[in-house]
Image: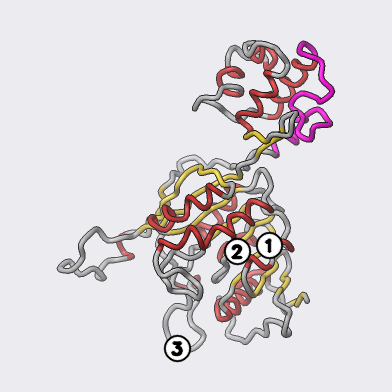
């Protein structure tokens, strides 16, 4: 539970707090992305186009324009294996998706947060409602649209680049199966350009590189080289793919009630909840564990009460978070401080 005490955020001009493995920025994340460590996971729970928070568009129609500079900055600082989790309403995500795709993010799948019937029970006027009650939000998973250069410097997505690298050897595609010691998986999955394409494991890329070097056209640039200088290694190639830890029996529909009880942050004075849409820590942990490893860096650019940063601490990750609203920032700082059980705030100038 958050302690009932006052936090002195910083001296004038000092807007970053460093608390253990977490750094918190009081301001617009666009002003501090350059200072953050490269992320493995970005959890973006920003405006929904409801006009409830300062600077938020009042309808979903303006979300693409609003998110565009953030999406571009995320892509600029992301690593090839970075995963973006984008929270919103169904229509909010639909409006924002073009900006995400245009700025380097590749759609993977949509998770549905089902809050359950209790979320609206007793709060629906059947005489005036003209549709079905909404008890869902979406958490959409994106990965970085990474590319690699050809001999002439032209950038190609991994799918096209792998086929290009094999073809410049002059060898028939069928030999890739022998290179990988499989019957047909290499041609069908690793080098195909159809929907059956599959991201190859590092050992398969190394095997194809060795085969092309041994049997293909002689070249000064090693085949399948990531940096254009050195032959590929399985370890470096595997780091080009977004991380994923699979959990059996978990589907893309997440049944989790809205936050209540001790986890819900209350207003410091009076009654009621401080934040209208506080996310369950359990869902933040689920996203972080699925797409990162202990020690990795989590970004929470629209911190609110910084549930993702709390989840990062609990799962052994590092975190960077930002929040514009002073009241939210103060409450989130106390949450983080309590989670770390640190007696004093360490202020970074």
Look at the image and tell me in which quarter the C terminus lies: bottom right
Q: How is the image coloured?
A: secondary structure
- Mark 1 sits on what residue? 33
- Mark 2 sits on what residue? 301
Residue 88: x %, y % from top left: 45, 59
Say which mark, if any, is on residue 161: none
Say which mark, if any, is on residue 270: 3
How far, Cα to Cα, is label 1 from label 3? Answer: 36 Å
The stretch drawn in magenta includes residue 231? yes
Q: What span is colored magenta in the figure?
A: 214-239
Q: Is residue 105 visible?
A: yes
**First in sequence: mark 1 vs mark 2:** 1
How far, Cα to Cα, is label 1 from label 2? Answer: 9 Å
Residue 149 picture quarter: top right
Closer mark to the observer between disc 3 and disc 2: 2
**First in sequence: mark 3 vs mark 2:** 3
Asked if the residues shown at circle 1 and circle 2 are in contact, with their CB atoms under 8 angstroms apart, the answer is yes
How far, Cα to Cα, is label 3 from label 2? Answer: 29 Å
The stretch drawn in magenta includes residue 346? no
């Amino acid at each position: 539970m958050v302690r009932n005490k006052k936090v002195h955020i910083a001296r004038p001009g000092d807007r970053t707090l460093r608390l253990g493995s977490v750094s918190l920025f009081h301001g617009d994340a666009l002003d501090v992305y350059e200072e953050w460590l490269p992320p493995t996971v970005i959890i973006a729970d920003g405006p929904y186009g409801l006009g409830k928070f300062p600077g938020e568009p009042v309808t979903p129609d303006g979300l693409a324009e609003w998110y565009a500079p953030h999406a571009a900055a995320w892509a600029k600082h992301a690593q090839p294996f970075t995963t973006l989790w984008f929270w919103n309403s169904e229509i909010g995500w639909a409006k924002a998706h073009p900006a995400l795709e245009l700025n380097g993010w590749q759609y993977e799948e949509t998770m549905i947060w089902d809050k359950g019937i209790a979320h609206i029970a007793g709060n629906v006027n059947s005489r005036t409602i003209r549709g079905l009650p909404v008890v869902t939000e979406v958490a959409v998973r994106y990965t970085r649209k990474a590319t690699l250069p050809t001999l002439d410097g032209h950038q190609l997505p991994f799918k096209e680049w792998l086929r290009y690298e094999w073809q410049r050897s002059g060898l028939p595609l069928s030999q890739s199966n022998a290179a990988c010691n499989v019957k047909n998986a290499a041609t069908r999955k690793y080098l195909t350009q159809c929907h059956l394409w599959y991201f190859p494991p590092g050992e398969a890329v190394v095997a194809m590189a060795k085969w092309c070097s041994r049997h293909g056209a002689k070249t000064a640039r090693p085949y399948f080289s990531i940096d254009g200088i050195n032959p590929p290694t399985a370890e470096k190639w595997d780091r080009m793919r977004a991380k994923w830890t699979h959990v059996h029996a978990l589907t893309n529909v997440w049944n989790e009630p809205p936050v209540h009880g001790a986890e819900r942050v209350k207003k410091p004075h009076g009654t009621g909840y401080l934040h209208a849409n506080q996310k369950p820590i359990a869902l933040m942990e689920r996203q972080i564990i699925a797409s990162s490893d202990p020690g990795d860096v989590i970004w929470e650019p629209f911190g609110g009460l910084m549930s993702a940063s709390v989840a990062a601490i609990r799962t052994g990750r590092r975190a960077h978070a930002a929040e514009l609203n002073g009241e939210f920032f103060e409450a989130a700082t106390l949450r983080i401080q309590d989670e770390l059980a640190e007696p004093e705030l360490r202020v970074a100038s």
